[in-house]
Structure formats: structure tokens, C-alpha cells
Amino acid sequence: MAARASVRQHILDVASELFYREGIRSIGVDTIVEKAGISKATLYRHFTTKDELVVAYLEAQDHINWQHFDEAIAEHAGSPKEQMLALIDATVELLEPGYHRGCHFLNALAEFSEEDHPVHLLAVEYNRAIRMRLSRLCQQAGASDENLTDQLMLVINGALSSVPIYGFMGPAAQLKTIAAHLIDFYLEKAKA
């Protein structure tokens, strides 16, 4: 059973790297089979369709990202403002060199515009979950409306989208500074 799980994980690892580096739709099953050194039958024994493999890729990335975010936020328990800043810092860490193609989920949204497609739905859900987490932290910190949440989402997604074009040292390098200014502005406004 462990060998079966390791074969499945190997296929997922190979496909994930290809999907992220070259795009989901541009990578065919034949390329995955070749790069993984397996047969098509082996691939289909573990993933009945390419869409199932793509969903597994995004679910794995979702787990990786949330584990990273949760660890960063946990270090600042009891301080919603510091937790928001930690979430931004964690996002910046994801942007650094290995993240040259931007956000896995925004890339998937760009490739799968069909609103009922499982890949599209998963990517939308991931972004909604981040917005919900930010909204909760903003409210706990004292920002009563959704303006801070929406503006933070805008700068986060802007940074993620700019990395493939300008690299990490382009506009994305301003994410932390802009987010900190927005957080300070809205929290001071809430106190007044």
C-alpha cells in the first residue's frame, strides 16, 4: 500500500511542477507520463482523469499554503493586527524566487474560466477563504467595514500577478509596505 501511495505522490509531484512551470492546459498526459517514467495505465490507476490530477495538484498547494499561513499567524495569537502583518509576510515569503510564475490559484483561474469546472471552483474557493480569514482578522483588529479586507486582497493579488512579469523585485516588493500602510490607516481611522 505504501508503494502505491508513493507512486501516486510521485505522479502528483511531477505533474505539479509541470503545471506550475508550464501551465496546466499546455501539459498533456503524455508529457506527465514521460517525465514521471510511468505508463498511462499507472497514471489512470491513480488519477482517472487529468482534471482529477489538476484538482489534486491544487488541493496539495492549498494545504501547503494554509499550513504556511497558519504557522505564521499562530506566532501572533491574540494580536489581530500582527496576525494580518504575519499573513502578508507569509505571502511575501511565497513570492520569493521559486514562485516565479505567481499564484497557482490565480493561474488556474486564468486557464479555467468555465465557472462550473472543478478547477475553477477550487481556485475561487481558495481566494474566498483568504478573504474570509483577512476579513475576520480585520474585524478583530477593529476595522468595522470590508474596505480594509478588499484593499488588502487587491494588493495581495496584484503582487501575486506582477511576479511573472516583473519578478520579485518589481511591484511585488511593495506588498508589505502598502499592506502595512493600509492596516495602520484603517486601524487609526477605527480608533478616531
Image: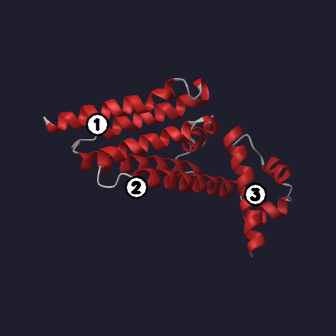
Give the number of the disc on residue 74: 2
**What residue did someone put label 1 on?**
147
Residue 137 position in % (x across, y down): 31, 48
* Amino acid type shown at disc 3: Ile
- As drawn, which residue projects farthest toward the left? 192
Report, in whole angstroms, how far the alpha carbon at label 1 lies from the one at label 3. Answer: 42 Å
Q: Are marks 2 and 3 in contact (CB under 8 Å)?
A: no
Q: Is residue 68 left or right of residue 9?
A: left
**What residue did someone put label 3 on?**
11
Q: Are marks 1 and 2 in contact (CB under 8 Å)?
A: no
Judged from the image, the secondary structure of the residue bearing numbered disc 2 is: helix
Residue 23 seen from this side: no
Q: Nearer the viewer, mark 1 or mark 2?
A: 2
Q: Residues within 10 Å of mark 1 (few under 14, many from 20)?
A: some
Render colour scheme: secondary structure
Q: Residues within 10 Å of mark 3 (few under 14, many from 20)?
A: many
Residue 155 seen from this side: yes
Position of 46 relative to 68 (above/below)? below
Residue occupying the point 23% across, 37% down: 187
In terms of sequence position, does the residue under pointer 1 or pointer 2 come before the other? 2
Residue occupying the point 75% across, 43% down: 27
Residue 150 position in % (x across, y down): 34, 37
Position of 177 relative to 105 (above/below)? above
